[in-house]
Image: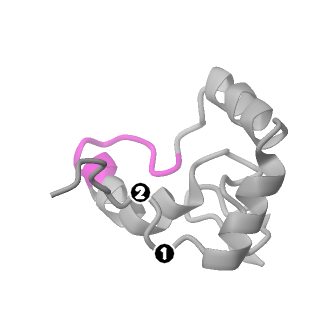
Amino acid sequence: MIECPQCGTKNEDDAKNCKGCRINMYWAFQHYEELAVIRQANKLASRPDTASFLIETSKKIDEGPTVGWLHNTIKKFGLKGAGKKVSTISE
């Protein structure tokens, strides 16, 4: 189990999004500290509520037709390299 850095919810190790606040777990672990510093400097809440439309959209994606493929891919490769820019143009 892994704890979400934004809301503290316990999630499965291979979760794409937090089941509590729906933040992308890869992004949260890569950039959350930076965001927390910016929020503190601007006197904003350190753990903001996630907009309801983002929660609903994320749930629909997680329960959609590619959820099995996504779950297996994350389980096989983990989240390392997720979000990495990959060029589609051959050099």
Identified at 29% across, 60% down, the residue is 34
The one nearer the camera, 80 or 13, is 80
Identified at 48% across, 75% down, the residue is 80
| Position in image of residue 4 (x %, y %) | 63, 64
| Label annotation for residue 83 | 2
Q: CA distance from mark 1 to mark 2?
A: 9 Å
Q: Is residue 58 left or right of residue 5?
A: right
Magenta-span inclusion, residue 76: no
Q: Amino acid at mark 1?
A: Lys
Q: Amino acid at mark 2?
A: Gly
Q: Which residues are magenta?
A: 38-47
Q: What secondary structure do most residues of the magenta stretch adopt?
A: loop
Identified at 64% across, 56% down, the residue is 7
Identified at 47% across, 63% down, the residue is 82
Label 1 belongs to which residue? 80
Give the secondary structure at mark 2: loop
Is the Cβ of the residue at disc 1 closer than 8 Å to that at disc 2?
Answer: no
Q: Residues within 10 Å of mark 1 (few under 14, many from 20)?
A: few
